[in-house]
Amino acid sequence: MQSNPPRPRPRMVLLACAWALAATAAAAQPQPSALQTLFEQAWQRQPEAQSLPLRRQAAQAGRASADTLTAEPAALELQTKTDRIGSRQGEREHTVGVALPLWLPGERARRAALGDAELQALASASQAAQLQLAARVRDAWWLWQRACGELALSQGLQDSAQALESDVARRFAAGDMARSDLYQAQAGVAQAQAAVAQARGACDAARAALAVWGHVQPQPPAGDAPVTEPAPVADANLAVPPTHPALAEGEHQAALARRQAELIAVQTRANPELTLSAASARGQAGDGYQQSVTVGLRLPLGAGVRAQAREAAALAQALEADTRLERERERLAAELRAAAAQAQATAAQESAMARNAELARATRGFVAKAFALGEADWPTRLRVEQDATLAERQWQRARVDAAAAVSTLRQALGLLPQ
């Protein structure tokens, strides 16, 4: 008698499906690049990032102060009066009071607006600091990319020089080539080895400089291909985006200065105080205590020229912030135009250098075959090899320059490493 196999439980089936969907979604999400991870680690180590929570807490507390009922904390007053010190006889009076600083007309709303402006300025300043850090991390990154590309190219040229030297040595042993030709080939190998050593030293130095920004140890790019960032979408009317961190910081700093000036404009005098006190007094010993309540209002006089000086200084600071914002907008627009032009030029140069390197490799292949068949002489073979080496080096540098120009364009657009 055969038993039916157990059927899977519906709960287990649902859990398995959910797990499969979660794994598929996780695999579909793009993984952060080494450059992005390096930048994030560098930002976490910056003083601005570590002090940001406390600065945000301070700004939030300043904003919350505008929601209180009094302009300043209330003050408690305790007072005892007697005409016979050290004795229980005679007149006595005990007073308990509280002083409540009141808001000036319009002060509370403008202090709230100032608190909101401080929070926005703090957030934009943090984003601007990230963008400034991104520029330094990108510089170190592309320095390392160039060094790694030079090392990979030098190693390839060394292999090519060694293969050429082996071919010349074989033909010299057969009596087809002179000893001077062999010396030239061996000198080419020595030069290639020196170039590899120099490139390896530069690559190690650039890697050490890159490690300063974080604990990420990125691997050198495979072959001689540079690791690039995503190219921004091309736009004929390329303009600085309004969300650019540097532009947003300038706008929020200018708004903060204006809110500060508006608040100072209503703070022409100290805050008035409402006082409320209760007194208990007696005339002589044995008399009963009499209760009384006092309500008072303290109105400070205007500050006069002092208030005018504070307001003028605040208005000057706001004007400087607005002017600085306009100059920053012009500078960002000029940097963006220059970065876009450089990216376009380096892309065209990379395309031309790629074609040149392709033709140089094809020519080297034809001449190598002709040299092996004895149809090409040694000077021609050596010259073509040098031309191919130069073409490969120019193409490698053009590739890195094109990738770095894209990164510079992203920097000009206010985009963080990705």
Image (cartoon, helix red, strand yellow):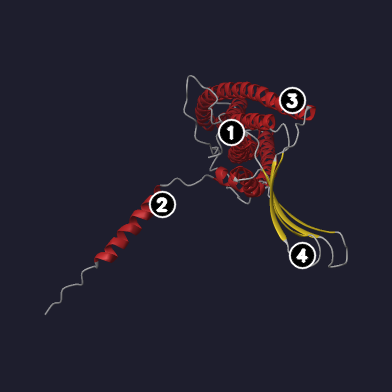
Cα separation between marks 2 and 1: 30 Å
**In this rendering, does residue 196 appear at all?**
yes
Residue that protrudes farthest toward the left in the picture: 1
Amino acid type of the residue that numbered disc 4 sits on in the rendered structure: Asp
What residue is disc 4 on?
A: 287
For the residue pair 4 and 285, the one nearer the viewer reads as 285
Amino acid type, mark 1: Pro
Going from the N terminus, do you reach mark 2 or mark 1 first?
A: 2
Q: Could you say which disc has been placed on residue 341 in the image?
A: none
Identify the amino acid type marked 2.
Answer: Ala
Quarter of the picture holding the N terminus:
bottom left
**Horizontal side, residue 230 vs residue 145: left or right:** left
The residue tagged 2 is 26
- In terms of image quadrants, where is residue 346? top right
Q: Give the spatial CA distance, label 4 vs label 3.
A: 60 Å
Label 1 sits on residue: 245
> Residue at 81% across / 66% down in the picture?
285
User: Which mark is nearer the camera, 4 or 3?
Assistant: 4
As drawn, 310 above or below 167:
above
Tell me, yes or no, whether the two marked residues, 4 and 3, touch with CB atoms within 8 Å.
no
Disc 2 residue crowd, few under 14, some 14–19, many 20+, Cα 10 Å: few
Residue name at image x 57 percent, y 43 percent: 35
On the image, numbered disc 3 is attached to which residue?
A: 312
Q: Earlier in the sequence, mark 1 or mark 3?
A: 1
Dot 1: what SS? Answer: helix
Whole-angstrom CA distance, mark 1 to mark 4, is: 75 Å
Where does residue 306 sit, x and y in percent of width and height? Answer: 79, 30
